[in-house]
Structure formats: C-alpha cells, structure tokens
C-alpha cells in the first residue's frame, strides 16, 4: 500500500515539476540548430472556402482574399457553394468575371454539409498547399505568407522517448 502511494506521489511530482525541469535542463545543455527561412519559397496555394447561403459575408471574404500579400499567380480561391439558395453564387460570379484566373466557383449539386463541400473542392484544387477557411473569417494581409513559412522546415529533430525517461 505504501509503495503504491509513493509511486503515485512520484508520478504526480514528476509530471508537474520533474518533467518541465528536465526539459529546461535539456534545453540548456543541448545545441540548437538555427532554422533558415527561404523567403523565395512560394508554392501554389489553394484557398478553399465552403459556403452555404453566405451572401452577407462572401463579398467581404473575397475582397479580403484578393488583398492578401501573396503573388496573385501563386494562389487560387475556390468557393465551394453547398447548394446555396441565396445570392452567394451571383456575388462570387461577379468577382469571378474580373478575376477568372484566381477565383473559382464550385457548385455542390445537393446539400451534404460543409465537409462534403470541402472534399469536393479538394478534387479541383491545383495548389501544392491547401488552406481551408470559413466565409466569415478574415485573414491578415500576411497570413498566407506566414503560414507558408512553416512548410519550409525540412529537418525536424525528434528526441526518442527513451532519452526523456
């Protein structure tokens, strides 16, 4: 009974204090590699926006995505309309006329939900990287550029669990 108590007490102590302390010690003792970011890395990106009756926000979303600071020839915007019955499709079409190389309207024939709308849009996406966003979410101008930076890291060092125990 006492042994069980001490084991449990040690595990609680190690989890709350010992493990974080061990990580701090390892951080100070081990060398760190600097991650170099190549700012010229600009893969093709597909931004997928599932939409169902989003006439109140879709225009603001399209304008927002057209104004992000990423090369216009390196991304596409796919609005996957999940059988919208309002003016969503007409709004997208009006922007599609002006930006036919960037904006694509994919019309889902029968309403099957957001996940299905996303899945069907993935089939026509041409980007190396897919970004999913809602119609009512607004991106910062640098959001896509910052997101792409995370895909440049080629080498990740993972410590085997046995080193931490």
Image: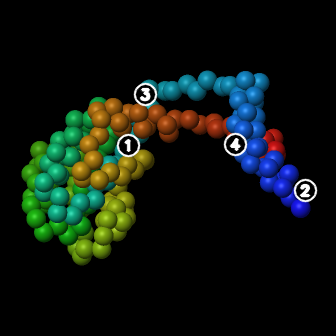
Q: Earlier in the sequence, mark 4 or mark 1?
A: 4
- How far across and down, in percent of the image, does residue 24 sit? 71, 30
Mark 4, residues whose alpha carbon is within 10 Å: few (<14), some, or many (≥20)? few
**Among all residues in the image, which is located at the extreme bottom?**
110
- Give the residue at x 43% y 47%: 128
Give the camera-side residue of 50 and 101: 50
How far apart, in angstroms, are the residues tagged by discs 1 and 2? 59 Å
Mark 2 secondary-structure assignment: helix
Q: Position of residue 8 (x, y in %)?
A: 80, 54
Residue labelled with disc 1: 44
Disc 1: CA contacts within 10 A as few (<14), some (14-19) or many (>=20): some
Q: Name the residue under label 4.
A: 16
Q: Do the residues labelled 1 and 3 touch (CB within 8 Å)?
A: no
Which of label 1 and label 2 is nearer to you?
Answer: 2
Which residue is denoted by mark 3 in the rendering?
Answer: 40
CA distance for labels 3 and 2? 59 Å
State which quadrant residue 25 falls in.
top right
The residue pinned by badge 2 equals 3
Looking at the image, tell me whether mark 4 or mark 2 is earlier in sequence order: 2
């Amino acid at each position: 009974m006492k042994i069980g108590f001490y084991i449990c007490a040690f595990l609680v102590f190690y989890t709350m204090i010992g493990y974080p302390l061990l990580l701090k010690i390892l951080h100070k003792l081990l060398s760190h590699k600097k991650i170099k970011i190549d700012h010229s890395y600009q893969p093709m990106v597909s931004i997928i926006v599932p939409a169902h009756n989003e006439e109140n926000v879709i225009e603001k979303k399209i304008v927002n995505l057209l104004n992000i600071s990423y090369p216009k020839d390196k991304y596409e915007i796919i609005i996957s309309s999940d059988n919208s019955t309002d003016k969503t499709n007409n709004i997208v079409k009006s922007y599609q006329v002006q930006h036919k190389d960037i904006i694509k309207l994919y019309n889902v024939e029968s309403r099957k939900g957001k996940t299905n709308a996303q899945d069907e849009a993935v089939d026509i996406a041409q980007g190396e990287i897919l970004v999913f966003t809602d119609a009512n979410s607004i991106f910062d101008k640098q959001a896509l550029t910052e997101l792409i930076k995370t895909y440049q890291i080629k080498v990740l060092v993972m410590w085997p669990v046995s080193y931490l125990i």
